[in-house]
Every structure is written in C-alpha cells, then in structure tokens.
Amino acid sequence: MSVVVDPEISSSGPSSSQGPTSGSGPSLYASGNVVAERYELVRLLGRGGIGQVWLAKSQTLHNEVALKLFIRGGPSDPGDGAERLLGEARAAAALEHPAIVRVFDYGETERGDPFLVMEHLKGESLEELLQRVGPLQPSRALRLLLPLIAALSVAHGKGVIHRDIKPANLFLAVDEAQQVQPKLIDFGLARLQRGGTRLTQAGMLVGSPAYMSPEQIRDKEVDARTDLWSLCVVLHELVTGHLPFAGETQFEMFKAIVEGDATPLPLGGEVDEELIAILRRGLAKRPADRFSTARELGIAFATWLVAHGQEEDVCGASLRNEWLRPRKISSLAPPTPAIAFRPPGLPASLKPAVASHAALAPTQEAIPAPDLGATSRVRRTKRRWVAPVLVVALCGLGYVAWRTLPRAEEAPAPAASTPAPSASTSATASAAKKGPAAASLKPPVVSATAKPSVSASAKPTKPVPKH
C-alpha cells in the first residue's frame, strides 16, 4: 500500500510570505520565459518533486497571477499528475465562493507540461501562522475557520470532496486594506462525488497521512464527512500545537487514527466541555457518528462562539446572520392542509376528516369544466330579444303619454254683445293675479254653453267688431 501525498509545493499555488521551497533537480523554466505565449514567468514561489508555482504576468491583461506547473517525468511523477491538475482546474472552476481560490485558465507549455492559472494571493497559510505565533485561542481559531467551513459547504453541495484539508491548504489572504480573507486552496486531490473518475488505483492512499480520516486509511469510499474529520484535526492542532493522533512511524499513526482515541483538549481558559464535545463528535471513527454536513458543524462552532461573546468571524460577517438565523422555507413547498372545523356540540363521530392534497385531487378533477360555448350561445340569444322589447316599450310609453296629456278646446263664437265674465272666469283671473305658480295649479275651465254675464262692478265695454 502506497501513499500519495499532496504535491510537494509548500505554497500550494498562491504566493506566501516566505521564499520558494527548495526541491530536487534543476528548474526547466526561468524568469522571463513566456508560457503558451500568454504568461511571462516573473518569480518562483514554490517547487516540489512534481511541479512548480510561479508568479506570472498576463501578456494580455498585465495583471499578476499564480501559475502552477506540472513537470512531466519528474523524480516524483506519480503518472497521473496531469490528470490530477486538470481535475483540480475543473473542480475549482466549478465553485464560486469568496473563501475558494479562483481559477482562471488551464493549458500546456510548449514542452507539453500542463499548467494551471489561479489568482495571486498575498499572505500566509495556517501552517505558517502556527509556526510563527504558536497555538491560538479557540475563539480566534474558529473565527479563522468558519469562512472555510462555509466554502466547504458550497463545495460539498456541488459534489466536490477536497480530500486534503490541512493547515498548508488553508490560506489567509490579505488585501491592500489589510483585510483577512481565508481561502481554501489546492484541489489537486479533490474528487467529484457525482460521476467523478477515480484517478488512484486500489490500495493507494490519497491525502496527507496525519489528517486522513479512518475511511481514507482503509481505502473506503469517502464523502463530505471525511473533510469534516480533517477540519477537526486542524482545529485541534491550532489550539494545542500538536496533532490529536500521534505515532513515531506512519504505521503507528494510521493505527492510532483507526483504533485509538484522540488526545483530548486540556480544560482551561476558553476550552470547556462544550468545545471538547464538538471535537469528540467531529473525530468519531464512524462517519455516521460525525456531523452530517459542513453547515451543521459550522452551526455548532458559531453557537459556541456566540456563547463566548463573539459576534463576527475574521471577515466581519455576522455569526447570527450567517449561521444561526433560520433559513427561509422555499415557496415551492406544498401548503399545509387546512384543519377541519367541528362546531361546538357536534358529535365526535360526525367530525369531518382532514383530507390530504392527494385525496382532494380526484374531487377537483370530477368537477366539470364550464361550457364556454354554451354560455356564448345564451348571451347571443338574449341579445336578439333586447331590441324588439325596447321598441314595444317605447311605443307603449308614447301612447300612454298621448292619452293622458290635456287637449285644447275650441274657442267659442263671439256674441253680439260683450259677455260678462262668469264665476269660473273670475276665479281664473284671480288665480292669475296670485302668480303663475298659483295659476298653474288648476287649469282654467271654460264652459261652452255658459252665457256671459256682467258683474255689478264691471263697466260695460264696446263690442269687438268682427274682422
């Protein structure tokens, strides 16, 4: 059984604050070389048995990038380095998250060596930080790790298993404003869980031995929980300064990982029983006994941080908003069935049952759809009868009005002498004096047979000659 360790490049792609790592064999590339007519090599950042990492400059955009070269036929060439580099490019390019290193390009040099172009990061890895300052307080370590756990959650959601989580592959990038952004780098051993191709042969272990999960050591099928195991090993190392499973030889270390118990965190300071319980679950031998997802692990860590007075991670993101706030329920979820109401006094035996959505479906389908054609025919039939009815109604109203309106009587023939006004005529004149309103209340009635008479006070008038 052989072990394939992570490519021996300490900077793992992006630049670190230290100089290039020494490696065996002379370099086949030098500063000033132009790779694939697109990238000029500026400075060597890291070197290993199977590859190199260069600071390069794009000939088109004139921006700085990190260029990772795989040297075919190198002293430690495992035979599948090119395929692994292409797999790393595809895995990283499929993921978008601020805490995941960005991949820009992939190609081959004129010599036929494949290369990967990534964003150029400035800062240091967690491995370098641990060597520089020693063990960290648990709260500081967790504030650094939570953005990386969020990045793992995104990767696992896309079916990408990193399989090589360790301090050297967890990078603390610093921008021009001195803001820290943790980055998950080096997907060289990543595996696509859905439809991925196994690049290693049976009996060959892939990863860094001290951070391998028991199922990795046993060469079993792995899933996202193997990354969570490795992450808990990293946390233990950041807090204590040593690994939870130790051994003088690789075999003894593997035996401790598979069969032994992890060295517990020492109680005291910020280390309490709650944190120890979280790590104990994260380092359970059986994957089923661990946290099931990266988000579940992140919620446990965020809850512990908030309980210890921390409200933000190292990037300034709110722990409550990012981890502890309940997620919104999808609007596509089926509505909750209404609870049937039973009026007071109704026997329990007559209580209507609550029907499920499936039970309501046949009832809804049994309701016939309305016949829109029949409705249109009824409307057209009604419109045919409207006009004749209106004509008949208007004619009837006109006839009634004609019968009820008063008609003018013929004027009487003038007599030889001037007729005296009758009592009815006097009443009419009196009404006229009172005004048009009073006169209109009662129309004058003139009798055709009444003889004119002269009142005692009336003066005789001359007869009007006939024309």
Image (cartoon, rainbow, N blue to C red):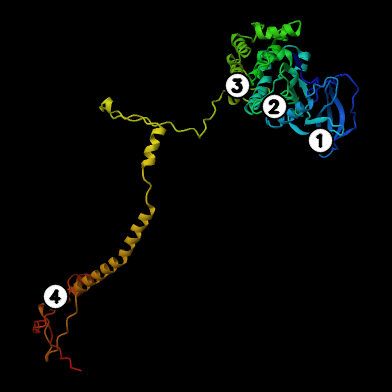
Mark number displayed over residue 63? 1
Q: Residues within 10 Å of mark 3 (few under 14, many from 20)?
A: some
Q: Residues within 10 Å of mark 4 (few under 14, many from 20)?
A: some
Q: CA distance from mark 1 to mark 2?
A: 34 Å
Q: Which residue is mark 3?
A: 293
In x, y percent, where is residue 389? 28, 66
In x, y percent, where is residue 339? 37, 30
Q: CA distance from mark 4 to mark 2?
A: 123 Å
**Helix, strand or loop for disc 3:** loop
* Residue at x 28% of width, y 25% of height: 348
Q: CA distance from mark 1 to mark 4?
A: 117 Å
**Helix, strand or loop for disc 4:** helix
Which is more N-terminal, label 3 or label 2? 2
Q: Residue furthest front?
A: 202
In x, y percent, where is residue 385? 30, 64
Q: Residues within 10 Å of mark 1 (few under 14, many from 20)?
A: few
Q: Which residue is mark 4?
A: 427
